């Protein structure tokens, strides 16, 4: 059912608007919403053929739905993947992609700089199933190579990392993995889909929380897993079909509409983030500022070859510890305190007490997540208003 009619001669940006659409018999301009859990058949013979896979069509919306198909079509076009499957959330996508690639007795090497829920899966859940996990310093290539064992099946990492914005070399890690018959899974949510393409850089599987920039307005939960058809339409499809972490048709419709403006929105996110990072780096109350678009970023050479722009996230450290960080947050007027990101509204969080609060003090120290670190997801507001809000809050501490 994948519509590839736009792939040959149109840009990705145009394909996100025009490609992959399924229209009903009414030929509507805007995609219809197919709010149905099931489907009917004209005969028992047709039902039998559908269940045997001998005829195309829908069976049950836990398996698929026209809105799901449209979103899968567009994401496949955008990412250049052979196939896609959707999930009810980003974490459902992370878990499914990991779980369907390992079994008892296997070994995973993963970056130590991961979202808290991803660390729970790796550190707390997988050991119960006799799946061994080694966490390595994310940017230490020697550590990745040294961690490989005969039973290593997966490399897993996010880049840029949450919240410290370290950037891992996708091509280099993918080459190392392939030489050892290891698959690579990349969580690409921070760079946004149009600004970094892991599959083109050698990764086997890319996962997204479509809740973030793909929706872009904080409305719906969703996740996506993209890769080769053999895996996506085989092992992964069967797992999702029978365990049920399905994306709702309505959420899929919202995200289809979100993709139409993704390029415009991400461009504005990145432009705003760059302006804010440049302005904040001049303020003496900022102890450290991390932004992939700045020339002083420690992995700038990697950023230049695999990312387009610096991304929509700015991380910074204040002088004065937690008390000053909280005072700064409480002094903001327009920027909202939230652990979410990728919204049209600018959102800020204190990772040490929210998204990464379950890490030990030693783990936080290794990653650089101090009590004075703040993560800012830059929105679509006028950048001067955002800079004024930040400056006023800095003046209050």
Image (cartoon, grey):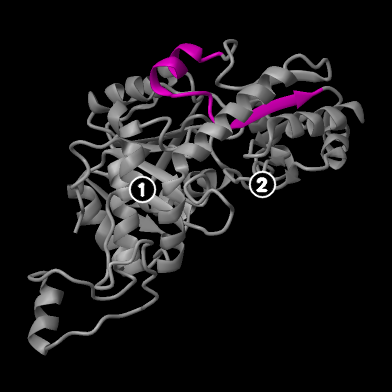
Q: Is residue 105 visible?
A: no
Q: Tell me the crowding category of disc 1: few under 14, some 14 to 19, or many 20 or more residues within 10 angstroms, Cα based.
A: some
User: How far across and how far down the image is residue 347, in percent?
Assistant: 68, 42
Q: Tell me the crowding category of disc 2: few under 14, some 14 to 19, or many 20 or more residues within 10 angstroms, Cα based.
A: some
Closest to the observer, 23 or 220? 23
Return the residue found at the far bottom.
Answer: 43
At 92% across and 31% down in the image, what residue appears? 396
In the rendered image, the quadrant that contains the C terminus is top right
> Any magenta on residue 315?
yes
Separation (CA) of disc 1 from disc 2:
30 Å
User: How far across and how far down the image is residue 56, in percent?
Assistant: 14, 69
At 42% across and 48% down in the image, what residue appears? 259
| Mark carried by residue 339 | 2
Tell me: residue 396, above or below residue 120: above
Give the mark nearer the N terminus: 1 vs 2. 1
**Would you say 235 lies left or right of 394 here?**
left
User: How far across and how far down the image is residue 253, in percent?
Assistant: 42, 62
Q: For residue 358, what is the image quadrant?
A: top right
User: How far across and how far down the image is residue 43, in percent?
Assistant: 11, 89
Q: For residue 366, what is the image quadrant?
A: top right
Residue at the spot of label 1: 17
> Any magenta on residue 307?
yes
Q: Is residue 320 visible?
A: yes
Q: Circle 2 — which element?
A: loop
Q: Give the range drawn in magenta.
A: 298-318
At 20% across and 36% down in the image, what residue appears? 9
In the rendered image, the quadrant that contains the N terminus is bottom left
């Amino acid at each position: 059912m994948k519509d590839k009619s736009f792939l040959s001669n149109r840009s990705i940006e145009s394909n996100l608007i025009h490609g992959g659409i399924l229209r009903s018999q009414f030929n509507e301009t805007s995609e219809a919403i197919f709010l149905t859990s099931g489907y009917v058949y004209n005969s028992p013979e047709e039902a039998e053929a559908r269940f045997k896979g001998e005829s195309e069509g829908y069976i049950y919306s836990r398996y698929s739905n026209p809105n799901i198909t449209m979103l899968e079509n567009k994401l496949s076009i955008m990412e250049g993947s052979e196939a896609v499957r959707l999930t009810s959330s980003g974490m459902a996508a992370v878990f499914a992609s990991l779980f369907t690639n390992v079994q008892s007795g296997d070994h995973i090497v993963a970056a130590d700089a991961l979202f808290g829920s991803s660390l729970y899966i790796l550190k707390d859940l997988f050991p119960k199933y006799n799946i061994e996990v080694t966490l390595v310093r994310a940017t230490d290539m020697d550590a990745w190579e040294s961690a490989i064992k005969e039973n290593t099946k997966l490399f897993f990492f996010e880049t840029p990392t949450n919240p410290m914005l370290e950037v891992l070399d996708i091509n280099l890690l993918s080459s190392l993995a392939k030489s050892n018959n290891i698959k690579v899974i990349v969580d690409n949510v921070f760079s946004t889909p149009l600004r970094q393409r892991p599959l083109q850089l050698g990764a086997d599987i890319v996962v997204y929380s479509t809740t973030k920039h793909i929706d872009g307005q904080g409305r719906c939960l969703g996740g996506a897993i993209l890769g080769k058809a053999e895996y996506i339409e085989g092992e992964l499809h069967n797992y999702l079909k029978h365990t049920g972490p399905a994306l709702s048709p309505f959420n899929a419709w919202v995200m289809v509409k979100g993709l139409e403006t993704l390029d415009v929105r991400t461009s504005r996110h990145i432009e705003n983030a760059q302006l804010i990072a440049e302005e904040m780096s001049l303020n003496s109350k900022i102890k450290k500022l991390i932004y992939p678009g700045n020339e002083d970023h420690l992995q700038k050479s990697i950023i230049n070859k695999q990312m387009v722009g610096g991304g929509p996230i700015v991380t910074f450290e204040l002088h004065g510890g937690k008390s000053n960080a909280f005072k700064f947050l409480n002094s903001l007027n327009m920027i909202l305190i939230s652990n979410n990101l990728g919204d049209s509204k600018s959102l800020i969080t204190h990772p040490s007490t929210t998204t990464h609060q379950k890490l030990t003090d030693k783990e936080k120290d290794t990653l650089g997540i101090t009590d004075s670190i703040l993560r800012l997801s830059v929105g679509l507001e006028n950048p001067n208003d955002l800079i004024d809000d930040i400056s006023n809050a800095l003046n209050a501490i």
